[in-house]
Each structure stands twice: as structure tokens, then as C-alpha cells.
Image: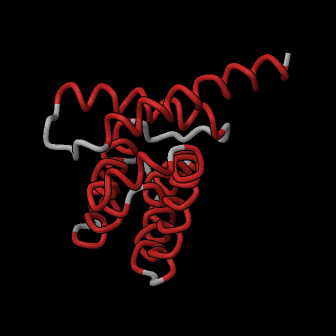
Amino acid sequence: MLVEFQQALADLTASPELCNEARREPAMLRRRYALSEREWQRLVGIVQHPGMECACIVYRANRLAPLALNLPQTCRALGPRLRDVASDYWRTYPEGNVHFYVEADRFCCYLQARLIADDTLPAAVLPALAAEAAAVAAALIESQTEAA
């Protein structure tokens, strides 16, 4: 059961939406995870604690860092849409990659596919993404070559 508790805590930290759902309906944690009574009570206490909001913010900041550092023009071009686009990306790819270029490259691929399917993104995203995606791909290849 400890593994389920740890997975639940990781999922909750990564998803403010899941935290809000658990606050509204704590029993959902039991349905979603195989938890002992003690583990369930601890998770309910954790999601109710005001510090959990901070934990979610820190998690999201860590996921945002590779995008902001490697794709600044793309992020700027997304403007207020960045929040929704990044949240959707994180739902699609719930596990981040600590290699900044891998994470940024994966976001580029995600965003390129989204641009094909969604014409409501700002027009400035396409040229910014094209330039920065190429730079990220080159840096990723170089980082893998240096590692070998």
C-alpha cells in the first residue's frame, strides 16, 4: 500500500485539479488508490493543508523552467494561453524529464501537433516555435553526443 500512497502524493503534487477534487470529495482517493485507513487520513490532511498549494506551485515551476529557459519567445507568444497550454501538456505528459532539452523538445513536439489541430493559438507562436524548436533539437543532439 505504501507504493499507492507515494503515487497518490506524487499525483496530488503534480495536479492542483486533483487536489481540489480530493478536497471536495476525499473518498475519491480511496477509489483511485489502494490505501490503508492511516494513509488515506494522511492524504486527506495533506490536501487540506495550506502548504499543499505551495507544493503544487513549486512542482509546476520546476516543470515550467525548461520551457521558459529554452523557449522564451514561444512562451511569450503564447501569452495568457501559456497557462492552459502548459497545464494540458502536463496532463498529457504527467512525468517530467529532468533533462531540460528533453523536456523542452517534448513540449515542442506537443505544441507542433497542437498547432496543426488547434488554429486558435496566437499566430506569433508558429514562427517563434519554429526557430526555438530547431535550437532545442540541436542542443539536445549535442548534449547526447557529449554524454557519449
- Quadrant of residue 89 within the rendered picture: top left
Residue 121 percent across, percent down from the top left: 21, 44
Say if 91 sits above or below 18 in the image: above
Is 29 displayed left or right of 14 in the figure?
left
In percent of the image, x 62 and y 34: which residue is there? 101
Residue at 60 percent of width and 38 percent of height: 97
Above or below, 64 relative to 138: below
Q: How many marks?
A: 0
Residue extending furthest toward the bottom: 50
Q: Quadrant of residue 102?
A: top right
Is residue 145 visible from the viewing direction of this image?
A: yes
Towards the viewer: 143 or 33: 143
Horizontal relation, residue 85 to residue 6: left or right: left
Residue 5 visible in rendering: no
Q: Is residue 58 left or right of residue 139?
A: left
Please state the horizontal and vertical placement of residue 110, each as a whole percent of the image.
37, 30
Residue sitting at 52 percent across and 47 percent down?
A: 67
Q: Quadrant of the C terminus?
A: top right
127 or 9, nearer to the observer: 127
Find residue 145 and report its horizontal and vertical position in percent.
79, 16
On the image, the x and y values in percent for residue 46 come to 48, 73
State the scheme by which the image is colored. Answer: secondary structure
Q: Nearer the viewer, residue 92 or 146?
A: 146
The relative height of residue 28 versus residue 1 in the rendered view (above or below) is: below
Q: What's the residue at 52%, 30% (across, down)?
A: 105
